[in-house]
Image: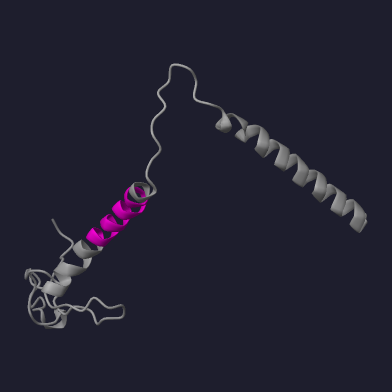
Amino acid sequence: MTTPETSPAATRLRRAVLLLGLTVALVAVAGPASADVPEGWSNPDDVDVLWALLVLGGIPLALALLITAFVYIPPMVRGERVAPGAPAVENQWIGGPSRSAAELAGPDTEVSEAGGASARW
């Protein structure tokens, strides 16, 4: 089964009708936004542009800088590299031996509990 081909003029007409319909819908929805303040409601003063930029831009920027400082300063104080691709920190096993895990003592008898998990409770 083949799909019927539409002419370029029909495609342009369909797109124009769709665009016109969307434009009318957006204007109809935005109409109430241009209404005056109802009677009995307060009419607040306009907000200063500098104050709006400070509140809407400055506060989020300050929070982002504060979070970045909380993330990066502790490792830098410990002397770790925080750059991407930095080598892994050598002592990740907290409270473990200072040697590698391959140097742990293995079980030497059947009842020995050395060597890690024994799968018994």
Q: Quadrant of residue 111?
A: bottom left
Can the viewer see residue 3 in this picture? no
Question: Quadrant of the image for the N terminus?
Answer: bottom right
- What type of secondary structure mainly makes up the magenta span? helix
Which residue does the image show at 80% across and 50% down from the upper left? Answer: 15
Q: Is residue 23 above or below residue 84?
A: above
24 part of magenta stretch: no
Q: Position of residue 58 (x, y in %)?
A: 31, 54
In the picture provided, is 72 more to the left or to the right than 112?
Answer: right
Q: Is residue 6 left or right of residue 87?
A: right
Q: Which of the two residues, 2 or 106, is positioned nearer the viewer here?
A: 2
Q: Is residue 110 left or right of residue 24?
A: left
Q: Is residue 51 visible?
A: yes
Place residue 113 in its image quadrant: bottom left
Residue furthest top as drawn: 40
Q: Is residue 60 magenta?
A: yes
Q: Nearer the viewer, residue 110 or 53?
A: 53
Residue at 37% x, 44% y: name it. Answer: 48
Q: Quadrant of the C terminus?
A: bottom left
What is the x, y in percent for residue 52?
37, 47
Whole-percent x and y of residue 75?
16, 71
Coordinates of residue 25 in the picture (x, y in percent): 69, 36
Residue at the (93%, 56%) spot, across then down:
7
Does residue 23 sit above or below 82 in this rendering? Answer: above
Say if 52 sits above or below 120 in the image. above
How many numbered circles are shown? 0
Residue numbers of the magenta segment: 53-67
Along the line of sight, the residue nearer the viewer: 16 or 82 = 16
